[in-house]
Image: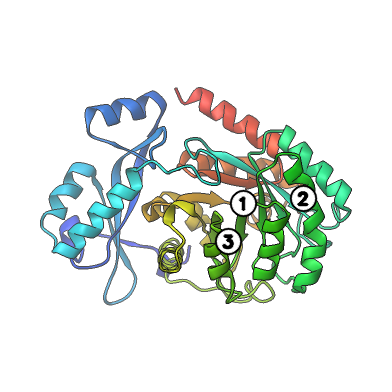
C-alpha cells in the first residue's frame, strides 16, 4: 500500500472524538477459544457466528487528510465511548451492535456458516472461463455439477465485466442467460443473476433467478433500484470504481478499505430509502474492480471492517489477477492455490459468502479449516 494510504497510528485519546468513527474487529478468535472468550465477557461474537473479536481498530478521517487509527480492547473502547459526544456514542453503539449481531437468513439461506456461490459465465470473453459455457446445455450441466460439488447458490452471468470488457446490449445478455437460469432453477438451484441492467434483472427473475448480483450496486441502470425494491429480491451490492472498460487505467483511493466501506454504507442507505430492507442486502468490496494490487490486498486484510455495515458480506477473489500478479500464474486453474488461500482468509474474517469457480476444492478447504478450529 502506498505510504500515503497507510493509517497513522495514534493514542486513543488523540483520536478526534467528534469524527465519524469506524470499528474494525481485530484479535479474532475461533472455535472453543471464541466461545470461552464470549462467555467470559471480554470478547464479542462477530456477526453472530463462531468467530469472536476481543479488540477493535478505531478508524477516523483526519481533518488535515489521511486516516488516524488506534487499536484498543473492547473494555477500553467502551470507556472512551462515554467521553465522546452523543452522535459518536450512538455511532459506536450502532457499529458494535452491527458487528456482533447475527445475520438473518438471506435468499432463504442461513448465513451462520460460509456459503459457496458457484460461477457460471455464459460469455465468450470472461477472464477465466470465457467461451466454455456458451452452449446452454453445457452451462446447465456445469451448474448442476457445481451444485453436486456443494454450491449453495449459482451465479449466472451473461456479460463479462473483466477489465477492458466491451459492454453488450440487454437483449443479447438475456438470450445468453435465460435458458440457463431456467434449467438450473428447475434443478432446484438458488440462482443469482450477475447483471447491472434492469431489463436483464426482470427477465432473469421471471426465468427463476432468486437473487440480483449487481457490480454497480444498483447505480449503472437508473431503473434497477426500483425494480429490485418492487421484486423484493435479495441483492448483492458491489463496489467498483469506474467502468469495466477503463476502471484499471488509474484507480485512486485515499484509503481503499475505508473508502469502499463508506461507499457501500451510502448504497445501503439508498436501498433502504427505496424500500429494500438491510436484511435483503449483501455487500461485496469488488476485488479487482477499479483497484490496484495494493488496494485489493489492503481490502482483503481488513474485511472485518465491512461487518460494521450490518449486512452479510460476499467476496469474489477466485482466480483473479491479484493472485496471478503475486506469483505470475496465468488465468485459470493455475490460480487455485491462491484462490483457496484467499477464501480461507476471508472465511476466517467472518465473510459469509465466497464466490468461486472451484466449488469442490473450496468446500474441502472450508471443511478442514472448520474441523481444526475447535
Residue beneath label 2, please? 182
Mark 1 and mark 2 in contact? Answer it, CB < 8 Å: no
Q: Secondary structure at mark 3?
A: helix
Find numbered disc 2 in the image and state the secondary structure of the residue it sits on: helix
Q: Residue 333: tell me if it is visible.
A: no
Report whether 180 appears left or right of 240.
right
Q: Which residue is mark 3?
A: 293
Which image quadrant: the C terminus?
Answer: top left
Residue at 61%, 41% in the rendered image? 116
Q: Which mark's residue is nearer the viewer, 1 or 3?
A: 1
Give the residue displayed 57% in from the left and 66% down from the top. 291
Q: Position of residue 321 (x, y in %)?
A: 67, 57
Q: Residue furthest left?
A: 83
Q: Are marks 1 and 3 in contact (CB under 8 Å)?
A: no
Is residue 113 or residue 253 the one in the foreground?
113
Q: Can you say whether 66 is above or below 334 in the image?
A: below
Tell us which disc is closer to us: 1 or 2. 2
Q: Residues within 10 Å of mark 3 (few under 14, many from 20)?
A: some
Residue 317: which numbered mark, if any?
Answer: 1
Mark 2 crowdedness (10 Å alpha carbons): few <14, some 14-19, many ≥20: some
The type of colouring in the image is rainbow
Amino acid at each position: 500500500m502506498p505510504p500515503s494510504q497507510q493509517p497513522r497510528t495514534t493514542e486513543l485519546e488523540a483520536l478526534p472524538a467528534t469524527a465519524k468513527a469506524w470499528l474494525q474487529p481485530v484479535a479474532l478468535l475461533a472455535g472453543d477459544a471464541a466461545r470461552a472468550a464470549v462467555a467470559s465477557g471480554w470478547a464479542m461474537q462477530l456477526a453472530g457466528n463462531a468467530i469472536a473479536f476481543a479488540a477493535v481498530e478505531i478508524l477516523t478521517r483526519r481533518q488535515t487528510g489521511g486516516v488516524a487509527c488506534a487499536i484498543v480492547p473492547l473494555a477500553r473502547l467502551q470507556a472512551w465511548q462515554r467521553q465522546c459526544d452523543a452522535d459518536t456514542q450512538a455511532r459506536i453503539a450502532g457499529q458494535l451492535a452491527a458487528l456482533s449481531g447475527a445475520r438473518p437468513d438471506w435468499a432463504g439461506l442461513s448465513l451462520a456458516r460460509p456459503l459457496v456461490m458457484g460461477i457460471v459465465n455464459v460469455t465468450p470473453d470472461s477472464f477465466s472461463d470465457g467461451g466454455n459455457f456458451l452452449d446452454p446445455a453445457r452451462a446447465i450441466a456445469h451448474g448442476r455439477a457445481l451444485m453436486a460439488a456443494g454450491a449453495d447458490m449459482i451465479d449466472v452471468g451473461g456479460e463479462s465485466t473483466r477489465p477492458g470488457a466491451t459492454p453488450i446490449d440487454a437483449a443479447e445478455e438475456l438470450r445468453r442467460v435465460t435458458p440457463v437460469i431456467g434449467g438450473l432453477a428447475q434443478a432446484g438451484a438458488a440462482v443469482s443473476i450477475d447483471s447491472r441492467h434492469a431489463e436483464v434483472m426482470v427477465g432473469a427473475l421471471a426465468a427463476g433467478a432468486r437473487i440480483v448480483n449487481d457490480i454497480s450496486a444498483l447505480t449503472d441502470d437508473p431503473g434497477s433500484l426500483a425494480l429490485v425494491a418492487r421484486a423484493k429480491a435479495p441483492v448483492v451490492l458491489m463496489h467498483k470504481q469506474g467502468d469495466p472498460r477503463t476502471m484499471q487505467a488509474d484507480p485512486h483511493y485515499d484509503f481503499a478499505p475505508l473508502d469502499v466501506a463508506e461507499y457501500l454504507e451510502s448504497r445501503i442507505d439508498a436501498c433502504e430509502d427505496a424500500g429494500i430492507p438491510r436484511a435483503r442486502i449483501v455487500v461485496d468490496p469488488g476485488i479487482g474492480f477499479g483497484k490496484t494490487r495494493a488496494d485489493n490486498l489492503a481490502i482483503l486484510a481488513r474485511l472485518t471492517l465491512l461487518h460494521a455495515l450490518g449486512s452479510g458480506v460476499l467476496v469474489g477473489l477466485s482466480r483473479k489477477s491479484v493472485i496471478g500478479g503475486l506469483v505470475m500464474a496465468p488465468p485459470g486453474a493455475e490460480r487455485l492455490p491462491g484462490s483457496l488461500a484467499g477464501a480461507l482468509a476471508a472465511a476466517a474474517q467472518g465473510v459469509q459468502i465466497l464466490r468461486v469457480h472451484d466449488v469442490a476444492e473450496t468446500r474441502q478447504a472450508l471443511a478442514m479449516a472448520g474441523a481444526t478450529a475447535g
